[in-house]
Image (cartoon, grey):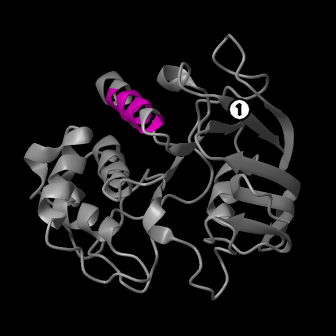
Amino acid sequence: MSSASAILEARELDVVLGSARVLHGVDLSVTAGETVAVLGSNGSGKSTLVKTLIGLHPATSGGVRLYGADPAGPSRAVPWQKVGYAPQRTGATTGVPATALEVVASGLLHRRRLRPGRDARARCLAALAQVGLADRAHESVQVFSGGQQQRVLIARALVREPDLLILDEPLSGMDRASMDALAATVAALQRRGATVVVVLHELGPLAGLITRTVVLHGGRIVHDAPPSSRGTDPGVVDAHPHPEPPAAVPTAPDLQRQW
């Protein structure tokens, strides 16, 4: 199913979660250097799609390829060190507290590397500086606001200096200054040729950076083209939070998990 130029692919992808079919026959191919916005209303399947693309949800039928390999399979062929992922964080739960620096350092770990490396501290502080939180590196993320927690997770994704960055609702809970900082970060990634896939309700401050919009409705792709001049695409403006259960506040790194 893989094409030579694609780094991320889905072909005839169906995903069933519980008793609900969330994705229906999705075909998607992302090539190096693109900045793709995945748009849609609540319940359209946006987050499920990106989680399936990196192996966090299994495909029920069809298939997914990440750098030519199955991200959910037992193979070690996926070069995880090239991939950065920041999930949406909208809520808080209890857990073992971790500092912002510790959360970001966990981004340097992957299936082939269980130690952050000698330059980890400098890299983590640099990533936190990109999101404006270097001065709070040693504070527990449990005292951070939702928007600040989101910025920490973006820093965790950035610390790898990834070739592919996947962001799930990164603008959630952010103030305008943080949004502008994120836009500057995405622009810097573009300049070095990185690929960005970002889940959004609307393009907002990222509008001028998006090269392609993919719109989901009812678990199907209904639009796939360059963004419209209005900054959004039909039927995707929805300011309400995503309905999936909120993820936990970051805790001490779990070495049994990829993300």
Where residue 26 sits, quadrant-wise, is: bottom right
Which quarter of the rendered picture does the N terminus lie within?
A: bottom right
The segment highlighted magenta reads 181-190
Front residue of this view, candidates 175 and 212: 212
List the residue tagged with mark 1.
213
Give the farthest residue toward the top. Answer: 229
Which one is in front, 15 or 130?
130
Q: Is residue 150 left or right of residue 117?
A: right
Q: Residue at x 23, y 59 (%)?
A: 142
Whether residue 240 sits left or right of residue 1 in the image: it is left
The C terminus lies in which quarter of the figure? bottom left
Let me know if residue 182 is in the magenta part.
Answer: yes
- In the image as oriented, which residue stretches furthest toward the front? 4
Question: Relative to 143, is 61 above or below?
Answer: below
* Residue 69 on the magenta span: no
Amino acid type shown at disc 1? Thr
Is residue 99 in sight in this rendering?
Answer: no
**Of the pair 48 and 195, the residue shown nearer to us:** 195
